[in-house]
Image: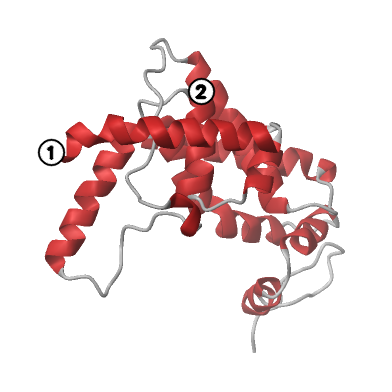
Amino acid sequence: MKKKLLDSSGSPGMTASEQRKTLCKLEDKNIVQLFLDGHEYAFAELVDRYDTRLLNFVYRTVGDLERGQDLVQETFVRVYRHAHRFDQTKKFSTWIYTIAGNLAKNELRNRSRSPLVLFQTIKKNWEADHRPLEWEDSSFKPDDLYRKRHLKALVEEAVNELPEHHRLVFVLRELEGKSYEDIAEITGCRLGTVKSRLNRARTKFASLIAPLLN
């Protein structure tokens, strides 16, 4: 017989396996509500859903994996403490990315070195392809995978040189695949400002990364 876990009232509840299956079917906002209702295991589900995604985002923004891990941990600490502030009429993903993005921006501001040049992307026809850049695909031959991984390293090197306000919108749009509307909400900028910064970023990035590709 499966061992039952205790729910928030102290009564036998679902097994861990049953909890997991139930949580997987729920939307983020429902998970948040469960957590607010006293079900601590719901918070673990939020961590599972967003830990890797946030680390990729923050790492690409600050360019430091170890520091990125610290910032993601701090993001979840803030979510845990302030979950009651989340507006459930909006996207949880936007809210948590906003928290992580603000921490990343603060990290960049606190660094002693000044941001260097703007950036743009090597991809052609940006507007025709709204998917985030992908670097791994099992259908690629080993040589192709090597070239893509090398290209990924070059892109990350270029991204690390970007001013924070341009780097953030670039990472959100081109590496995370966020919509312009979501980026505007995450960054607290007007939609026109997001598009303007992104266009300038793309234009400059081409000249920044071109020498690295030769």
Image: 157 above or below 90: above
Q: Which residue reaches farthest bottom?
A: 1
| Residue located at (20% from left, 61% from top) | 145
Q: Nearer the viewer, residue 102 or 133?
A: 133
Q: Quadrant of the N terminus?
A: bottom right
The amino acid type found where label 1 is placed reads Asn
| Residue located at (87% from left, 64% from top) | 9
Image: 191 above or below 126: above
Element at label 1: loop
Q: So how many labels did they put on this image? A: 2
Tell me if 146 is positioned left or right of 122 in this view. Answer: left
Element at label 2: helix
Q: Position of residue 93 (x, y in %)?
A: 66, 52
Tell me if 156 is positioned left or right of 42 in this view. Answer: left
| Residue located at (69% from left, 31% from top) | 189
Q: Which residue is mark 1?
A: 214
| Residue located at (67% from left, 47% from top) | 182
Q: Quadrant of the C terminus?
A: top left
Q: Which residue is mark 2?
A: 107
Q: Are marks 2 and 1 in contact (CB under 8 Å)?
A: no
**Residue 157 in sight from this viewpoint:** yes
